[in-house]
Image (cartoon, rainbow, N blue to C red):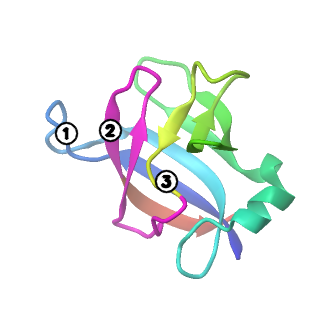
Amino acid sequence: MTWTTIRLELARTQAFPNGSAARCYVMRLPLGPEGLIDEQEYRRHPELATVRRFWPNEPDHHGCLLHTPSGWALSYEKGEEDDEKIFRLDTHAIQPGSYLSLTAPSGERLPFVVKALASA
């Protein structure tokens, strides 16, 4: 298991046919050798699982990863109103070039590509 810094960038969408490097997340998560989240390490040190959201024309958001009854989510403030759900994080290997889907509090689901991994 290694704590890993992960950069996600918006993948191709109808509004952004080439994706957008300006819409990104930098996360710090514990990953096992297969690129899956190490839930045991997360439970030992949940305070280390962090996220920073970069979006044009908005202040950066700083938050954490939460394991909720309905799955994994990124959260920036107490309560669920701002949580961004991560689709199938528990079964999806995080590797360069792979994709993750995040669902905004509004319900909009967006695809993100893993652009970089680095040991944290």
Percent x, y of residue 63: 67, 34
- The residue most toward the right is 44
Residue that appears at 55% across and 20% down: 59
SS at mark 1 in the image? loop
Tell me the CA gap for discs 3 and 1. 18 Å
Q: How many marks?
A: 3
Judging depth in this view, the residue of 119 and 90 nearest the camera is: 90
Please rate how many residues cluster around mark 3, counting C-alpha atoms within 10 Å: few if below 14, some from 14 to 19, many from 20: many
Say which amino acid is labelled 1: Thr
Tell me the CA gap for discs 2 and 1. 8 Å
Judging depth in this view, the residue of 35 and 51 nearest the camera is: 35
Percent x, y of residue 13: 19, 39
Which residue is tagged 3?
7
Which residue is tagged 2?
110
Q: Earlier in the sequence, mark 3 or mark 1?
A: 3
14 vs 24, left or right, is left
Percent x, y of residue 14: 14, 34
Which residue is tagged 1?
13
SS at mark 2 in the image? strand
Please rate how many residues cluster around mark 2, counting C-alpha atoms within 10 Å: few if below 14, some from 14 to 19, many from 20: some
Residue 31 in which image quadrant: bottom right
Q: Earlier in the sequence, mark 3 or mark 2?
A: 3
Contact? badges 2 and 1 (CB < 8 Å): yes
Say which amino acid is labelled 2: Leu
Residue 113 in which image quadrant: bottom left
113 vs 90, left or right, is left
Contact? badges 3 and 1 (CB < 8 Å): no
With respect to residue 64, does 42 lie above or below?
Answer: below
Residue that appears at 53% across and 80% down: 34
Q: Earlier in the sequence, mark 2 or mark 1?
A: 1
Task: Give the residues drawn in magenta, as a range.
Answer: 90-112
With respect to residue 100, does 119 lie above or below?
Answer: below
